Amino acid sequence: MNKILLMALLFISYTASAMTLDDVQRSFASQPIVRAKFQQERQISGMAQPLHSSGEVLIAKTKGLWWQQQHPFPMTLVLDDSHMVQVMGSQAPQIITADSNPQMFQFNHLLRALFQADRKVLDENFSHVFTDQGNGKWQLVLTPSTTPLDKLFSTITLQGDKVLNRIELNDLQGDFTEISFSNHRLDPRKLTHEEQQRFAF
């Protein structure tokens, strides 16, 4: 009887402390700015060797997403609610607007939602399975349920703790992309002057 009682207490204790997707969203919502380094590996079907790239990323709720690839060649992407800017090396910026490419901006909206664990956007576009992995770690497997996402990806898997640490993209062509984030910096909680200039196109 004591063993049964002990098991019941342990179960209650576990379920009371188990992390949920809502917990992750609340944690991410308290982070107005996230800075991190990224490493990306892309395995393309039919290619023997994966493609590697690395750089820095900045996510600001009030501005958007700044993605700077530094290796193997410099490339910068800036995404906000109305336009996307791509700069390759010293070339002139290429600007795409929401009106000219609505699908790109649907994906942009989704990408920012992933970084913020936006429950509303996730519920509207995916079926999902959330797993508490213990010690503050979690995994979220997303299966697209809307077009064009369901024509591009079979699954998108997120892993993290207080921050997003990893994204895995399985596309329908058999390609696989893994993006790992490290050296997260949440302070200062406002953009510096130099960071503000990154969004000034």
Image: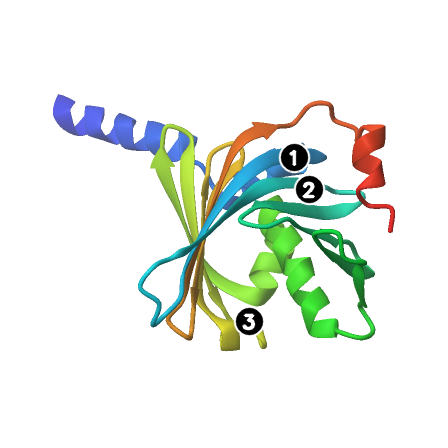
Badge 2: residue crowd in 10 Å (few <14, some 14–19, many ≥20)? many
Q: Is residue 1 visible?
A: no
Q: Say whether disc 3 or disc 1 marks the residue closer to the N-terminus.
A: 1
Q: Is residue 154 above or below residue 197?
A: below
Q: Is residue 20 visible?
A: yes
Name the residue beneath numbered marker 1.
34
* Circles 3 and 2: CB atoms closer than 8 Å: no
Name the residue beneath numbered marker 3.
149
Q: Where's residue 113, x and y in %? A: 63, 52
> What's the amino acid at mark 1?
Val
Nearer-the-camera pick, 73 or 84: 73
> How many numbered circles are shown?
3
Write down the quadrant of residue 193 in the picture.
Answer: top right
Name the residue beneath numbered marker 2.
59
SS class, disc 3: helix
Q: Where's residue 83, x and y in %? A: 81, 61
SS class, disc 2: strand
Badge 1: residue crowd in 10 Å (few <14, some 14–19, many ≥20)? many
SS class, disc 1: strand
Q: CA distance from mark 3 to mark 2?
A: 22 Å
Q: Is residue 6 above or below residue 34?
A: above
Badge 3: residue crowd in 10 Å (few <14, some 14–19, many ≥20)? some
> What's the amino acid at mark 2?
Ile
Write down the quadrant of residue 146 in the picture.
Answer: bottom right
Q: Is residue 182 above or below residue 66?
A: above
Q: CA distance from mark 3 to mark 1?
A: 25 Å
Q: CA distance from mark 2 to mark 1?
A: 5 Å
Write down the quadrant of residue 59 in the picture.
Answer: top right
Nearer-the-camera pick, 115 or 38: 38
Q: Residue at (53%, 44%) from the top-left corner?
A: 54
Q: Say whether disc 3 or disc 2 marks the residue closer to the N-terminus.
A: 2
